Amino acid sequence: MELNDAILQRRSIRKFKPDAVDSATIAKLLEAARLAPSGSNLQPWRFIAVTSEEMRAKLAATTLDFVCTAPLVMVCCADLNATETRAERSAELRAAGAFAGTQLENMSLADYQQRTQSDPAATAAYLSLNVAIAMEHMVLRAVELGLGSCWVFMFSRGKVKKVLDLPDNLLVTGLIPFGYPDQEPQPRPRLPLDQIYLGEV
């Protein structure tokens, strides 16, 4: 499948067949997420695949009713400790030649870190944005694998953390139910290009 076909065919699916998503398919989704880009190559995403009926039933009380009807719910988290690896990750990028020919090539690590420091709220938002990129990689790969999915941000972060007994450093960014679609939605309304493209300067 061409990438553009996956983009065109993707829909938010809220009705799923009961068929399980096998471990090999879950691994393919995770591999797509693993290859996503991230700022400073921090790769802050962490995932929990909720597949058992027992855990999905517990998770159901934390979010919208359709989410846990999917055979797989991917709980997508940002590791707030990921920024502590910035020196290591940036050194890897430098060694791989990622900064060659740019201002970053000759920038000291101290200057690099100073330019990327921010307050805790901004850091959490930044890491969550990186997780969202990985989430979209999974969503598009799912289309190729014949799966449906839906981005979900309506959930109780505290309740999800409690159900899954997550440590304090993991910030639940979003939930993605995955499964074989039991519906064929029509394309959703989208704004025309002239309303989103502000022009070339």
Image: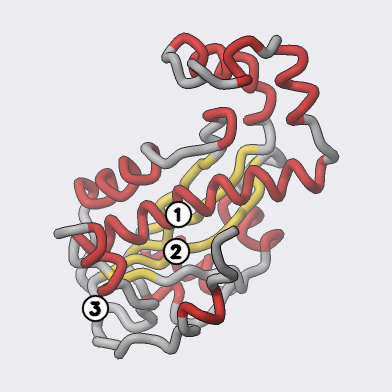
Mark 3 to mark 2: distance in Å? 16 Å
Q: Do the residues labelled 2 and 1 touch (CB within 8 Å)?
A: yes
Report which residue position mark 3 lands on.
17
As rendered, which of 40 and 161 lies closer to the eye? 40
Q: Check residue 201 in the rendering and tell me which mark sits there, or answer none.
A: none
Residue 194 image offset from top left, x and y in percent: 51, 80
Q: In which quarter of the image is residue 103?
A: top right
Tell which circle, 3 or 1, labels the residue nearer the N-terminal end. Answer: 3
Q: Which of marks 3 and 2 is in front?
A: 2
Residue 102 image offset from top left, x and y in percent: 56, 21
Is residue 154 visible in the rendered image? The answer is yes
As rendered, which of 110 and 19 lies closer to the eye? 110
Q: Check residue 176 in the rendering and tell me which mark sits there, or answer none.
A: 2
Residue 50 image offset from top left, x and y in percent: 42, 57
Quarter of the figure that contains the C terminus? bottom right
Mark 3 crowd level (few <14, some 14–19, many ≥20, 10 Å Cα): some
Report which residue position mark 1 lands on.
135
